[in-house]
Amino acid sequence: MTMAHATEFFGHKPVHTMRGYAVVLDGKTVALGGIHYQCGVLCAFLEIKDELRPYKTTIARMALKIRDVFDGKEGMAVASPNEPTADRFLKWIGFEHIGSCADGEVYKWHG
């Protein structure tokens, strides 16, 4: 993933320094996923646009690549309440549900 991918996807430069992957479909960035530090905690993220939703295998591969970016480190993820499959998906790739916060359900990755 490059700064250009992130800027195109979000419409502005990212707030956090990120490491991860981008999915480009027909010349357009349709997904970003990886890790970033927030308040000193390693956090996973996966943001997808509707154009990618029919490509379920690509989304699954992206999630598995994000898991690999942790490189043996512990980290967190928050399941967006706006994404109905987020909880199931995080459990599927190996995150453990540990509680809730104002932003959604909280999951931990055990490096």
Image (spheres, grey):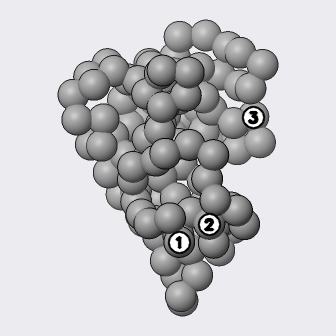
Q: How many labels does the image show?
A: 3
Q: Residue at the location (61% across, 10% down)?
A: 99
93 in relation to 12, above or below: above
Quarter of the picture containing the C terminus is top left
Q: Which residue lies furthest to the bottom in this view?
A: 26
Whether residue 54 is visible to the viewer of this picture, yes or no, is no
User: Type of residue at label 2?
Assistant: Thr
Mark 2 near mark 1, Cβ–Cβ under 8 Å?
Answer: yes
Where does label 3 land, which residue?
Answer: 81
The answer to which of 86 and 16 lies nearer the viewer is: 16
x 75%, y 34%: residue: 81
Q: Viewed as shown, does residue 80 lie left or right of 26?
A: right
> Contact, CB < 8 Å: mark 3 with mark 2?
no
Quadrant of the rendered image containing residue 61: bottom left
Q: Distance between the residues labelled 1 and 3?
A: 28 Å
Q: Earlier in the sequence, mark 1 or mark 3?
A: 1
- Residue that label 2 marks: 7
Q: What element carries label 1?
A: helix
Reading the chain from its start, which is encountered first: label 3 or label 2?
A: 2
C-alpha gap between disc 3 and disc 2: 24 Å
How far from the left and from the top, in percent, is residue 66?
37, 46
Where is residue 28 shown, x and y percent of the image? Answer: 58, 81
User: Can you identify the residue that label 1 sits on?
Assistant: 4
Q: Which amino acid does label 3 sit on?
A: Pro
- Judged by depth in the image, the label closer to the viewer, 3 or 2, is 2
Mark 1 neighbour density, 10 Å: few (under 14) some (14–19) many (20 or more): few
User: Around disc 3, counting alpha carbons within 10 Å, would you say few (fewer than 14), some (14 to 19), or many (20 or more)?
Assistant: few
Looking at the rendered structure, the secondary structure element under dot 2 is helix
Residue at image coords 42%, 35%: 92
Point out the image quarter for the N terminus.
bottom left
Determine whether label 1 and label 3 are within 8 Å by CB: no
Q: Which residue is drawn at 53% across and 69% down?
A: 5
